[in-house]
Amino acid sequence: MNKPSRFQSLDQLWRWGSRPIFHRPRWFLGRVTHSQQMALLRILAVATEKQLSLIDVLEAFEKDIHGRWRFQVSRLIDLLRSGVPLADAIEKVPDLLPSNAFFLIKAGAESGTLPSALSLAAEVCMEQRAERVRTSTGVLLYILAVCLVLFMIMLFIGYWIIPKFKKIFYDFNVELPSLTQRIIEAFDLAANYFWVPIVAVFLLWIAQKILIRIRFLENGWRPTFVYGLIYPRGRAPDVLRFLHVTTESGRPLMGAFETLAHTSSNRLLAERFEAILQDVHKGNDCWTALHDYSLLTPSEVRLLQSAQRAGNLSWALKAIAKSIERRINYRMMLIREYLEPAFIVGLGALVGIIVIGLFLPLVSVIYSQA
C-alpha cells in the first residue's frame, strides 16, 4: 500500500483547516440588503414571466452570492424542490424579499396572477426605494453626523474638562453652582452606566424579532394595528395595485376581494377585508365598500366608478394607487421637515445648558477672588 506523500498530507490538512466552522452561514454572519432583495425579486419576475424553471434559475443565481444571503436563497431552493409553492416558500424564509412586495406576491399567487404581481412588485419597490433614498438619506446622514460630533465633544468634556474643574474648585475651596453639579452628576451617571444603552439596543432588537414572528409588528417597527385600525388607507395602494393586476388578467373582482380577505397576514386588516367582502356579497358597490372602511375617498370612488363604466378601470386603479402613495410620502416628508428643526433646537438647548453650566463656575471663582 502506497504511503501518501508529505505534500498530499499537507494538502489534506489545509483543506480540513479551511473548512467553515459552520456548514451554513448563520444569521449573524451578515445581513440581507435591499439591493439583494430587489435583485432576487427581478429574477423571480423574469423567470415566472418567461416560464423558466425557478430552481435552475435560483441555483445559477446562488453560485455568485455569499454569506447569509446565500443561505436564504438555498433555503428557498430547498423549499421549492420539496414542492412548496413560491409564495409559501417566500413566506417561510425571512428577509428574502422587501416586506411591501410580499402582499402583492401572496395575493397574486392566490388569484393565479403571480407573474404580473411579481413584475408590478419589482416596479413599485424600485420606485419606493428611489423615493426613500432621495428624501431620507441626507437627513439621516446629517443627524448621525451631528450626534457623532456631539458625542465626541461630550466625551472630551467629561474625560478632560470636568476633572480639571473639580480640582480647581477644590483648591479654591469654592462650591460649584447647582447647575454645574447636575451636569457633573449626569456625566458621572453616563460614565458608570455606559453599557445600559448597548444592552437596551440589543434587547430592542430581540424584542423586534419576537414581535415580528408573532405578527405584532410588520415592515420594521410598525405595529399591525396602525394599518388595521388607525390608518387602513396606508394599505390602499397595495390593494389597488392587486386589483389592477386582477383586472389586467381579466379575472372578476369578486375573486380578488376573496383573495384579499384570505391572504393578509395582518389579522385586523384581514377582518376589514372580510367585512368589505360581505358588503360586496350583499350587492353593494365594491368601491363604496372600500370607502366605508376608510380605504378610499369619495372622489376616488367616483373616479373608479366612472373608469369602470368607460372600460379604463385598470389604468385608474394603478394611477390612484400611485397618487395615494405620493400623498402619503408628501405628508411623511412634511412631518420630517418639522421634526428636523425640532431635533436641532433640542440639541442646541442641550449644548447651551452644558456651556452655561461650565461657564458659571468661572464667574463664581472670579467673584470669590474679588
Image (cartoon, rainbow, N blue to C red):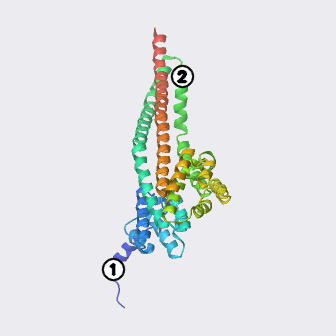
Q: Which element carries disc 2, helix, strand or loop?
A: helix
Residue located 52% across and 27% down the image: 183
Count of labels in the image: 2
Q: Nearer the viewer, residue 330 or 96?
A: 330
Within 10 Å of disc 1 (Cα), the crowding (few <14, some 14-19, many 20+) is few
Q: Is residue 134 above or below residue 51?
A: above
Tell me the kind of residue under disc 1: Gln
Q: Is residue 159 above or below residue 196?
A: above
Quadrant including the N terminus: bottom left
Tell me the kind of residue under disc 2: Leu
| Residue 123 in sight here | yes
The residues bearing labels 2 and 1 have C-alpha atoms spaced at a distance of 74 Å
Q: Mark 2 and 1 residues: CB-CB less than 8 Å, in contact?
A: no
Residue bearing the label numbered 1:
8
Q: Nearer the viewer, mark 2 or mark 1?
A: 2
Q: Is residue 7 above or below residue 177?
A: below
| Residue 219 in sight here | no
Q: Which element carries disc 1, helix, strand or loop?
A: helix
Q: Nearer the viewer, residue 130 or 213?
A: 130
Residue located 46% across and 20% down the image: 359
Q: Earlier in the sequence, mark 2 or mark 1?
A: 1
Residue located 54% across and 31% down the image: 186
Spot occupied by residue 128 in the image (x, y as percentages of width and height): 44, 51
Q: Nearer the viewer, residue 78 or 175?
A: 78
Spot occupied by residue 100 in the image (x, y as percentages of width and height): 50, 55
Spot occupied by residue 172 in the image (x, y as percentages of width and height): 48, 17
Q: Is residue 193 left or right of residue 156?
A: right
Residue bearing the label numbered 2:
179
Spot occupied by residue 154 in the image (x, y as percentages of width and height): 45, 32
Within 10 Å of disc 2 (Cα), the crowding (few <14, some 14-19, many 20+) is some
